[in-house]
Image (spheres, coloured by chain):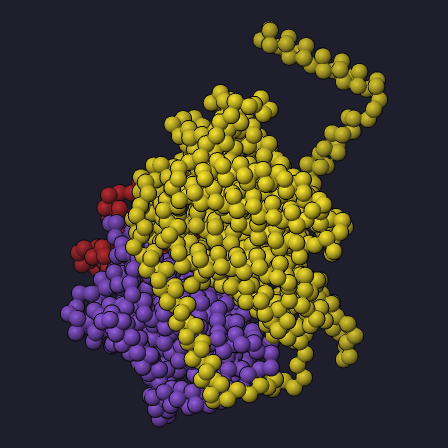
Chain colours: A purple, B red, C yellow
Amino acid sequence: MIIALDFVLRLALWIALAPLLPGIINKVKAWVAGRRGPPVLQLYFDLARLWRKGVVLSDLASPAFLAASAVGWVAIAAATTLLPVGPAGASLSFQGDFILLIYCLALARFCTVWAAMETGSAFEGMGSAREVSYAVLAEATLIAAVLALCVQTRSLSLPGMLAPATGAGAILLAGGLFIVLLAENCRVPFDDPNTHLELTMIHEVMVLDHSGPPLAVILHGASMKLLLFALLLTQAVLPTGHLAPAWAGVAIGAGVLAVTVGVGLVESLLARFAFRRVPLLLTMAFLLCLFALLIAWKGGAA
Amino acid sequence: MNETLNLLVGMAMGLNLLALGSGRLPTLIRTVALQGMTLGIMPLLIEPRFEWPVVLVSFATVVGKGWIIPSLLRRAMRTANIDREIEPFIGFVPSLLLGAGGTIAAVALSRALPLLPEHAGSMLVPGALASVLTGFVLLIGRTKAISQVCGYLILENGIYLFGLLLIQATPLLVDAGILLDVTVGVFVIGIIVDRIQRAFDSLDTRKLTVLRE
Amino acid sequence: MTAGFLLSVGAVAAVAATAAGRRLPRIWLSLVSLACAAALAASVRVLAGAGEWEWRSTYALAGQPVHLRLDALSALFLALLSFIGCSGAVFSREYWSDEHKPDSAPRGRVAWISMLICMALVLTVSNGLHFLIAWELFAVCGYFLLTLDRGNGDARAAGWLYLTCSHAGTLALFAFFSLLAVHTGSWDLGPMRDRPELAPLFWLALFGFGVKAGLFPLHVWLPSAHANAPSHVSALMSGVAIKMGVYGVLRFSGWLPTPQAAGWVLVALGASGALFGIVFGFVQNDLKRLLAYCSVENVGIIFVGLGGALIALRHGEAPWGILLLAGALLHVWNHGAFKSLLFLGSGSLMHATGTRELSRMGGLWRRMPWSTVLFALGAVAVAGLPPLNGFVSEWLVYLGLFQAAATRTVAAWAAVPAAIALATAGAVALAAFAKASSVAFLGAPRSDAAHNAHECGPLMRGPMLAIAALCILLAFLPSLLWPALMRAASDWNPALTAVALPAAMPALALIQATLAAIAAVAVLLLVSRATKTGVRRGPTWDCGFAAPTPRIQYTGGSFSGIVEGWFGWLLQPQRFASDPRGTLPTSSVRVARIPETVLERIVGPVAAFVTGASAIARRLQHGRLQAYLLYILAGVFLVGITVFLGVFL
């Protein structure tokens, strides 16, 4: 009973806190541009508004269109239950949980692509094609990063992998994971969450035909995914395992905030890359993680 | 001391990869300059005592590789009105993967080489091998003369790293010689670049194939 | 009822089915089902721990005493064979029925049950000579099934290619079994791990069985064969027949000693094959070719597991070795299940639309809801996504690889690249099946055929439902299967001691089930919310484009265009295009084709050279008696010189 309550409470916390991140990013962007910007809680208002609105469905969409949004959200939520948060640990952890986490995110991607293709729109097809193609490189990078952590700590579950200090490769790992965070969450320089020029987008273009509650679910899922990656990055780099629980919590919070602000700064200072440069950047991220892996391996042996 | 040195060599290796992946000439030149400066600091770390010649050569390397050569290259680029985009023969991603594979191979190889015991833990040898390889990839895989000059500079940096191994035996002789070589070389290339530009209206080395007769 | 009794019942039923196949389709079907049920029951008994079944007879066939054996390893494959064999037989009653194909349907029934018998024999015989005979008959039955539709030129060409490649493999197996017999002095097969001089024979077995398994560079026959065969045959070939190759490598890498490099070579071939196979698959626009290449990927995953287990054996590190082997064995079942489901699904699509081209389908969910759901289920499973069975076996393989990497020993050099290759292959597999399912079933119909499609009947739907149920079962109950996998693993090589079920397995199954349940609840919640706030239908927004036609939907070719560009060096895509010209262009053509690179760029030229050389040699054979007498004289002369040299030097 306690376990169930714990599980539900954690999930509720995830659900409640996640929409803060896009708000902070937007605030940073506004601050850099010298504007006042939307309130930090803007996404909450948007979600509430969308939840009340009606749905316009494409004539071509099957019942699976709505189902895909819901399943995609559940998949991301499942991934969040596997990610430990500092001293509080994870709701669920077992040997090989990181594989389930990565594949839950993949399931979410499959659902988004499925829903996008339901509408028969060429633009949404284009976005889906980009999403699945860039995910190939992002997934290779992510597995290399997890391998680096696994080799470093000789642990096979996320709580063991993320707690101890990372070694010399931490900077490389941080760089690689940050690039993956940007790519997987469709931020600049891979995608521009603010533009409405469909030809140039990845994720936004896939949800063009979503409206009302399904769109709210998709947006909320995206914010949870952002928080997930920010937490993963922070804990992979910061040696929180050596701190007292309270300080570890503070450090993780500060880390996530730093990552979020970093995303905002990148978004303010960089322009979106041409699509042909995207594989190059992701390859760099992959190599960063690969070298972090080699350092963890050889550094540990020496 | 050794840790800092290894860190610097690691940085130089990272800059190799950055050079392979950069798609614009100014970035490439900046990367090479940064690598040159990184290398310039190294003699100070290797030589335990404070000696004037070391400081002098180190200073000369930092200034020469970090400032003089890049500004020469930038000037050549400006006067010759070169397009800033790099056109690769070997695409960016393949050359990046090639460079990364080369780096890993260099690290693996240097473990197998019969080195002096005092160099065993050092990254100098793999760093040198990786830089030479990167230089070759740039020389082979790029079309523009300026980016090839950058490849040549990285190759020279690799040889310089090898030279650092000899610093105890023949203090700074190799380094000073290389520095001199490079400066003269870049002067000459700067002049040639200008000539090529006037003769062919382009700096595309592919067009030099008409000279084969 | 013992396994022997069950197997003899199955054998009798199967032989009777061969006789009934031509004229009595209903009786044929019942007999096939009976035979399959008996074989399944026998293998379940063996897998459940009833012990190995062995039968030696004094009766000699081809000069060798008959020796049959069913241990847990062969039972694992026999169970798959009987399940898919029976499902395919039911499917074929509607798909390849007497009404539609009056001339080939009877032939198909006989060939089907013969193929099942031959494969069952391959799995059970324990004599080298008999193995070769069964293997050859199995290959020939495959050829007859593949070319059921004799009028189809593509199918005939694919059949020839299949037969040629299959025989190239059989040639290696001839050498393998003969050398084995020479070394051991008997054709009898069994464990002989203590004879290190036999180790080099592994390479012959790897080639011979690798061809049949579709291991990457040897897979050249597979895409065209699986694409052009009737779909129920494709399902059998992809789900079961290529597993015979896997079985061969497994069996003889377990019974014989293996060379030092064997594990490394298997991991390297498997990992690169998984990645390249699925990349080839992703860029195909022919649904069945896509599925066929995906089989190459999955065989790669199986071989990574097997190779890893061999490396673990060498280093005495059983814990991760057994995880990898268990993953590989479970993946044999999983791939057999979801791939035959997908091939049967593609058969249902072809039945309805008459085409395999993805770009002529689209919007089929409206007409074919059952097929859509079942195909999507298969797609999620094959992409290795939770909560279905593909994920469980891939998870085991990953876990083994990560454990190997964490040891930081030399084995990590195999595990790290393999894990990265598998992850990349997994992401491409997701892309490939997102493409296959969405281009075929979603959006608007792209052709009249797709517009007028019809759902398949109960005899086609039933087997697909059964296999889909198997997929779900394998996903949620892997912990029940664990003892069976361990028995198979210890029959493979007892040095690999069985380990207790990893604690994570039941947890994983529970999480998968919970995930599925919560997802269902979430879907209901969202649907109810949407109906509450009101659902309006409208045309796809598509950025306000006013006159959409189905032709402007994103095609499969464009969907895979980005990845095609990345792997252009491997895929070597060919394009024939005449671009539109002028202000009012009349016509423009664009044809894109992805060649089977290994076949057309490597095997083809080599074969052409051999053919050319043979043509020159054939000039010696012209029918003139005088010249032949001259050859004899020259031959005698040559022998004389040799003898002379031998005596005096």
Residue A22 % position (x, y): 37, 82
The answer to which quarter of the image holds residue A184 is: bottom left
Up the image or down, C425 lies above or below B115; here it is: below
Tell me if I can see residue C179 in this picture.
Answer: no
Q: Residue at x 66, y 73 (%)?
A: C445
Up the image or down, C416 lies above or below A199; here it is: above
Residue C51 % position (x, y): 39, 37
Up the image or down, C64 lies above or below C230; here it is: above
Q: Nearer the viewer, residue C486 or C82?
A: C82
Extreme residue in the front direction: C1
Q: Nearer the viewer, residue C230 or C173?
A: C230
Q: Residue at x 29, y 65 (%)?
A: A92
Classify residue A295 as left or right of residue C567: left
Q: Quadrant of the N terminus of chain A?
A: bottom left
The answer to which quarter of the image holds residue A163 is: bottom left
Q: Residue at x 67, y 12 (%)?
A: C639
Extreme residue in the bottom direction: A36
Classify residue A246 as left or right of residue C478: left
Up the image or down, B38 lies above or below C636; here it is: below
Residue C439 % position (x, y): 60, 68
